[in-house]
């Protein structure tokens, strides 16, 4: 990263030593993701997208607090340009450096001070260049767009501290031509139309990791109901039948969320739902917060409730309790895989023990879930061995301690972040057992761990 030079370290009374925020959050797997020097509290986006020209433009208002005496700071923003930036109302200097927007306020920002950055920006959003983990980022479609992807996607459509360790609330007003639908996360707000354009509004008031945001624009059949007193929004593309397997699967969202709540504790968000997308580039489902997004390929022939159980389980494991660092991805996927098995047992189609036995038999133990490496972030060890780890833990500490662990975990770290060491510590506390060897074998061992 090239330093800007002379103007970067304003002096201030009181001996403050203003320094630039780091250009990355320091994640060993993805050192350039996110940034240092501040924590975002909320994103408020007011955007307009024209599918005819594929141009996105608008304003991002970001409320944040400095975590150091800050002379300048970065936001992640890929392929889009800022035209004007203010910090606390004063025009700031900004410069694009690769996928970073470097902002230098006229005066340094004191540690712990809250500040507001307003960024006018726009351009033609595109995908991220790195597709090793699947298509991610902004995908333009025939009638709109889909912004989706893990481990990063948000920086392709708004300036963001793009790392899950900095969770923030999210508010979106998106203006599109009349006749198109704008889907996103959280609770829907009022819809207004003027001059052939309609503004859709969505608010997610529980803080989220940035990759759990989404916006989906196009021709969709949206259904709005309530579940347990909260909005339930589901949507399938017009290109799919209104009562086909995709719609039938989404219709089970409330029932499955209620079942998971009996295991994991109260549902953590203000809204429910699910969105199906029909686009060959998206061959995955993602646990976008309060409203997962599913590729229609899961429902090509028949309804699939197991994938719904997986993504809904993430609302507790991954969304409400989010990662501190990407290495701990098994905390998300292991528990979501365990939830798939739990749901199959509940539905009477299989048993947990039979699934465990089949998965354990002949498994390739050379890959580990505890430190899978970037290239195996979404590998079988993270999912299947992660799920087996959770089941083996339950068998080792017993059902009562395991049930206490699940609800204590989801309430203690609700709306926050956690890591593997914190899970091990809590499992030892609730069970009164020393579990060091157990977790070493299951998360990091290269040979078959002892069966529970
Ligand atoms: Zn998952």
Image (spheres, rainbow, N blue to C red):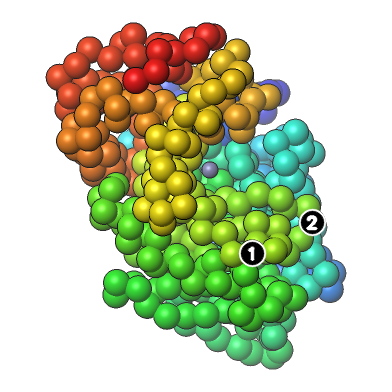
Judge by depth and name the residue closer to the eye, 369 or 51. Answer: 369
Tell me where residue 319 appears, x and y as whole percent: 43, 46
Q: Is residue 206 visible to us here?
A: no
Seen at 17% across and 24% down, the residue is 431
- Residue 423 - label: none
In which quadrant of the rendered view does residue 14 lie? top left
Quarter holding the C terminus is: top left
Task: Tell me the residue at 42%/22% (across/down).
Answer: 17
Above/below status of 181 relative to 311: below
Left or right: 64 in relation to 260: right
Question: Considering only order in the chain, which callout, 2 or 1, is on the residue closer to the N terminus?
Answer: 2
Secondary structure under tag 2 reads loop
Element type at marker 1?
loop
Which quadrant of the view contains residue 52? bottom right
Q: Are marks 1 and 2 in contact (CB under 8 Å)?
A: no
The 10 Å Cα crowd at callout 2, few under 14, some 14 to 19, many 20 or more, is few
Residue 200 in percent (x, y) is at 56, 76
Measured in 3D between alpha carbons, the distance from the residue under mark 1 to the one under mark 2, in whole angstroms, is 18 Å
Instruction: Point out residue 174 in the picture as x, y percentages from the top left corner.
Output: 60, 71
Neighbours of disc 1 within 10 Å: few (<14), some (14-19), many (20+): few
The residue that disc 2 covers is: 280
Does the residue tagged 1 have its C-beta within 8 Å of any atom of ligand 1? no
From the top left corner, tell me how far across and down residue 10 is, in percent.
50, 30
Look at discs 1 and 2 and give the one toward the viewer: 1
Residue 302 bears which disc, if any? 1
Q: Quadrant of residue 176?
A: bottom right
Q: Is residue 158 left or right of residue 9?
A: right
In-front residue for pair 402/189: 402
Residue at image location 41% in from the left, 56% down from the top: 347
Q: Is residue 81 above or below residue 425?
A: below
Whether residue 101 is visible to the viewer of this picture, yes or no, is yes
Residue at x 19%, y 16% (from the top left corner) = 433
């Amino acid at each position: 990263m090239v330093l800007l030079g002379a103007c970067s370290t304003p002096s201030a009374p009181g001996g403050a030593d203003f320094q630039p925020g780091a250009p990355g959050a320091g994640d060993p797997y993805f050192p350039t993701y996110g940034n240092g020097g501040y924590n975002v509290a909320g994103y408020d986006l007011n955007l307009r997208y024209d599918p005819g020209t594929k141009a996105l433009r608008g304003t991002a208002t970001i409320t944040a607090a400095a975590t150091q005496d800050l002379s300048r700071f970065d936001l992640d923003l890929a392929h889009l340009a800022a035209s004007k930036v203010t910090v606390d109302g004063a025009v700031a200097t900004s410069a694009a450096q690769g996928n970073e927007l470097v902002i230098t306020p006229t005066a340094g920002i004191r540690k712990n001070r809250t500040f507001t950055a307003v960024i006018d920006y726009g351009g033609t959003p595109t995908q991220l260049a790195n597709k090793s983990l699947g298509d991610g980022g902004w995908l333009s479609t025939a009638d709109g767009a889909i912004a989706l992807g893990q481990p990063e996607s948000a920086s392709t459509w708004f300036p963001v501290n793009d790392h899950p360790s900095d969770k923030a609330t999210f508010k979106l007003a998106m203006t599109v031509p009349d006749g198109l639908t704008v889907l996103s996360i959280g609770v829907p707000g009022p819809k207004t139309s003027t001059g052939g354009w309609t503004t859709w509004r969505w608010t997610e008031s529980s803080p989220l990791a940035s990759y759990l945001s989404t916006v989906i624009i196009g021709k969709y059949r949206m259904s709005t109901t309530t579940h347990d007193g909260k909005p339930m929004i589901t949507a399938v593309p017009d290109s799919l039948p209104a009562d086909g397997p995709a719609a039938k699967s989404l219709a089970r969202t409330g029932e499955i969320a209620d079942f998971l709540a009996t295991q994991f504790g109260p549902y953590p968000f203000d809204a429910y739902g699910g969105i199906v997308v029909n686009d060959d580039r998206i061959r995955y489902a993602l646990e976008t917060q309060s409203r997962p997004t599913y590729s229609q390929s899961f429902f090509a022939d028949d309804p699939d409730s197991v994938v719904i159980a997986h993504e809904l389980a993430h609302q507790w494991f991954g969304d409400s309790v989010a990662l501190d660092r990407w290495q701990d991805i098994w905390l998300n996927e292991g528990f979501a895989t365990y939830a798939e098995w739990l749901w199959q047992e509940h539905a009477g189609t299989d048993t947990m023990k039979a699934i465990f036995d089949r998965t354990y038999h002949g498994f390739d133990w050379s890959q580990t879930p505890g430190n899978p490496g970037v290239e195996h972030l979404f590998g079988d060890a993270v999912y299947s061995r992660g799920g087996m780890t959770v089941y083996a833990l339950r068998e080792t500490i017993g059902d009562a301690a395991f049930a206490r662990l699940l609800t204590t975990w989801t309430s203690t770290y609700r709306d926050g972040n956690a890591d593997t060491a914190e899970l091990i510590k809590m499992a030892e506390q609730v069970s009164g057992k020393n579990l060091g060897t157990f977790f070493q074998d299951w998360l990091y061992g290269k040979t078959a761990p002892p069966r529970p």
